[in-house]
Image (cartoon, helix red, strand yellow):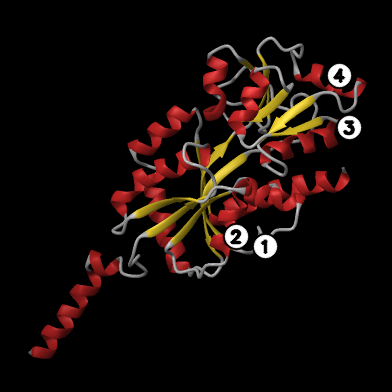
Amino acid sequence: MQRRQLLAGMAAGLASPALAQAGWQPTRPIQCIIGFAPGGGADLIARAIIEATQPLIPQPLVVVNRPGAGGTIAAQQVALLAGDGHTLLMGGGSESTSIPAFRQLPYDARRSFRAVMRLMRQRMFILVKADSRFRTMQDVIAEARAKPGQVSHGSSGVGSIYHAVFVVLEQRAGVELLHVPFTGGAPGLQAVAAGQVDMMVASPEEFRGLTDGGLLRVLACCSADRAESFPEVPTLKELGLDMDLENMKGWLVPASTPDEAVRYLHDRFRQGMGTPTWRAFLERAGDTDGYLDGLGFQRAMDQVLDAITGAVRKT
């Protein structure tokens, strides 16, 4: 009788939801490392998805900003950690897809991490001052061909994704531009608005206030398709330039992180992407759901890195 009761109890336990969900669980706070300063695009995205997902994870999700060197300082730190599921890196941008094309880094962008999931596609747009002499992207190309090295563009630093866009553009269009690096996207956009440089690339959450205020004007979209928020703006592909680049943001973990932990983190953050908190953030940012699973996210990052590496090698 006791044996039958024991077996029945074991069967009931195996069928219970609590045990069915047993597996890897975080046992201490999860550090969410962001390689950029508070208030920037990567920081805003991270904080929004953390707010949406925190109720689904029994341990605190702790934001840690480690700004510097285009996100590579934070990436190097995470790459050296043991993969135990308690450290996440907000990656997919310069530290993953452009800076490795320009210089050697103490980590391997393709092998030092495991991609958990992509959260956002950050469309990039080329902007000029509202009263710029350049009315279209064709005007930019024409003057750059006539006056090599005289049409200027800003960036958020050498090797950044915003710099890389123009390196690829130079290679595809057969032109030479003047690069003026700044310490971040915001100073570069202010320089464009002040007429100190001719143009710059940025994402909507960074430039929306300047375009709405009549200080900047959008010339082209760098994505493969037009943006719903700027339907009148043509893509570079439509203008005859064989290129499409996007900034991306998602979670990476150290390469040694076990499958169970990666699945747990993916599934919880994927649930967070279905919440009103996250959907409201996307609406404010003026973009759409950019979800990809880990393998898809890694492929997308590799494709961007390949395109930028190819252009850098030809310059």
Q: Amino acid at mark 4?
A: Glu
Q: Quadrant of residue 9?
A: bottom left
Q: Which residue is mark 2?
A: 76
> In the rendered image, which quarter contains the N terminus?
bottom left
Q: Is 83 left or right of 235, judged from the image as shown?
A: left
Discs 4/2, front: 2
Please provide percent x and percent y for residue 280.
38, 32
In the displayed structure image, the side of residue 35 where residue 137 appears, left or right: right
Q: Is 7 on the left or on the right of 139, as rendered?
A: left
Q: CA distance from mark 2 to mark 3?
A: 35 Å
Q: Is residue 233 visible?
A: no
Tell me which numbered mark, 3 or 1, is placed earlier along the sequence. 1
Q: Are marks 2 and 1 in contact (CB under 8 Å)?
A: yes
Please name the residue shown 52% across and 29% down the image.
205
Contact, CB < 8 Å: mark 4 with mark 2?
A: no
The numbered mark, 2 or 3, whose residue comes first in the sequence reads 2
Closer to the observer: label 3 or label 4? 4
Distance from disc 1 to disc 4, alpha carbons, whole Å, reads 39 Å
Q: Find disc 4 in the rendering and name its residue.
A: 143
Residue 17's place in the image compared with 218, above or below, is below
- In the picture as drawn, the residue positioned furthest to the left comes out as 1
Q: Secondary structure at mark 4?
A: helix
What label sits on residue 174 in the rendered view?
Answer: 3
Say which label, 4 or 2, has the lower sequence index: 2
Mark 3 vs mark 4: which is more N-terminal?
4
Q: Which residue is mark 1?
A: 106
- Per the image, label 3 sits on a secondary structure element best described as loop
